[in-house]
Image (cartoon, rainbow, N blue to C red):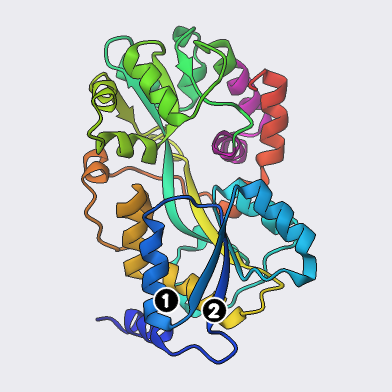
């Protein structure tokens, strides 16, 4: 056992102080597999987790209304734009932790919030209708040769806003707007539904190609449902932009709140989420990748998807471009 891991396990296993025997968690993650994370943390530390789950906007509104009297210690959610929104509202406190700084790569954390898992924005295409060479990058989705072929969820969704923000950072606003207009011109239908709906539409031939998050693909790959298996038989998956800046990734993460009444417990919990044990739960439970380098996971779907070159743009920069991306998408008609 290396020295860093030993110190991490020691830190989370120490008994909680009298003031920190509980932790109030506001969570916008709604995955049953996270239950094991919470139970294991409680067992290791003796700190009881009191959890409130709701949608991101509802939790942020609650935190604003509670103000300085909020009982919440930690806020966790999915998507960098949502974490950035909480940060912009001044909700997160700066966290100084050698454990977090050493285990989570610099581009996947800020001074206030940390990514604990990643997912990629991939391209899926119909094997019969589309040539693989025509969908190797995000930019190609705006090529007129894909007229009436593209399906995607609403432009206002954080998954797409984060991608737009990343494109702005890499390509600039003018090129991103031209791309968005070309993408809209290629829509097979008006945006509707979630990422699973896009995958099924491509598998059924309603669309030729779609933008989706990788964990939806992995979930369907592991599914035993007949319609899911049929949809997956008709599609292939592409890691976009492998010859340029890499496939866009998004995150699930969280941070300690400024008004946290149990700050010691909050830091211990965030450090626990960076432990090998928790990182494996993220990967196996929701088909995401660990943010901590070197963590070994055994997820058959992720293994089948294989390795890829991921974009290493600082997650803080990605999230800050969401407002500009929304304006561009609005002008392009991606609603």
Q: Main secondary structure of the magenta part?
A: helix
**Which of the image's four quarters has the C terminus?**
top right
Q: Residue at x 60, y 36 (%)?
A: 161
Q: Residue at x 42, y 45 (%)?
A: 119
Closest to the observer, 28 or 287: 28
**Which residue corresponds to mark 2?**
22
Within 10 angstroms of label 1, few (less than 14), some, or many (20 or more) residues?
Answer: some
Task: Look at the image and give the residue range highlighted in magenta.
Answer: 158-181
Vertical side of 52 occupied by 243: above or below: above
For residue 101, say whether it is visible: no
Task: List x then y, in percent, for residue 195.
Answer: 45, 30
- Horizontally, residue 239 falls left or right of residue 18, namely left
Identify the element where label 1 is drawn. helix
**Which residue corresponds to mark 1?**
42
Which tag, 1 or 2, sits closer to the chain's start?
2
- Horizontally, residue 281 falls left or right of residue 250, namely left
**Which of the image's four quarters has the N terminus?**
bottom left
Tell me the distance, in whole angstroms, between the alpha carbons under discs 1 and 2: 9 Å
Closest to the observer, 40 or 286: 40
Residue 161 sits inside the magenta stretch: yes
Task: List x then y, in percent, for residue 288.
Answer: 37, 49
Vertical side of 301 occupied by 51: above or below: below
């Amino acid at each position: 056992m290396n020295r860093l891991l030993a110190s991490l396990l020691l830190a989370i296993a120490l008994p909680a102080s009298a003031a920190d025997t509980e932790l109030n968690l506001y969570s916008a993650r709604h995955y049953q597999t996270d239950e094991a994370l919470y139970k294991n943390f409680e067992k290791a530390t003796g700190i009881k987790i009191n959890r409130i789950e709701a949608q991101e906007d509802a939790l942020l509104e609650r935190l604003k209304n509670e103000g300085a009297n909020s009982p919440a210690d930690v806020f966790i959610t999915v998507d960098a734009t949502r974490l950035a929104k909480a940060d912009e509202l001044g909700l997160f406190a700066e966290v100084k932790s050698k454990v977090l700084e050493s285990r989570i790569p610099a581009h996947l954390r800020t001074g206030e919030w940390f990514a604990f898992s990643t997912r990629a924005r991939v391209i899926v295409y119909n094997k019969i209708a589309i040539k693989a060479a025509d969908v190797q990058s995000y930019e190609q989705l705006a090529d007129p040769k894909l007229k009436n072929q593209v399906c995607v969820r609403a432009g206002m969704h954080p998954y797409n806003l984060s991608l737009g923000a990343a494109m702005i950072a890499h390509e600039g606003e003018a090129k991103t707007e031209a791309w968005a207009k070309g993408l809209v011109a290629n829509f097979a239908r008006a945006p509707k539904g979630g990422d699973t709906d896009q995958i099924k539409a491509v598998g059924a031939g309603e669309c030729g190609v779609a933008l989706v998050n990788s964990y939806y693909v992995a979930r369907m790959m592991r599914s035993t449902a007949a319609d899911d298996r049929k949809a997956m038989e008709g599609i292939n998956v592409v890691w976009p932009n492998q010859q340029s800046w890499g496939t866009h990734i998004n995150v699930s993460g969280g941070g300690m709140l400024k008004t946290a009444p149990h700050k010691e417990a909050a830091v211990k919990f965030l450090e626990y989420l960076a432990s090998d044990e928790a990182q494996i739960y993220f990967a196996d439970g929701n088909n995401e990748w660990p943010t901590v380098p070197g963590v070994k996971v055994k997820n058959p779907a992720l293994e089948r998807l294989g390795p890829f070159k991921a974009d290493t743009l600082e997650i803080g920069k990605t999230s800050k471009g969401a407002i500009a991306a929304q304006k561009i998408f609005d002008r392009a008609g991606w609603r």
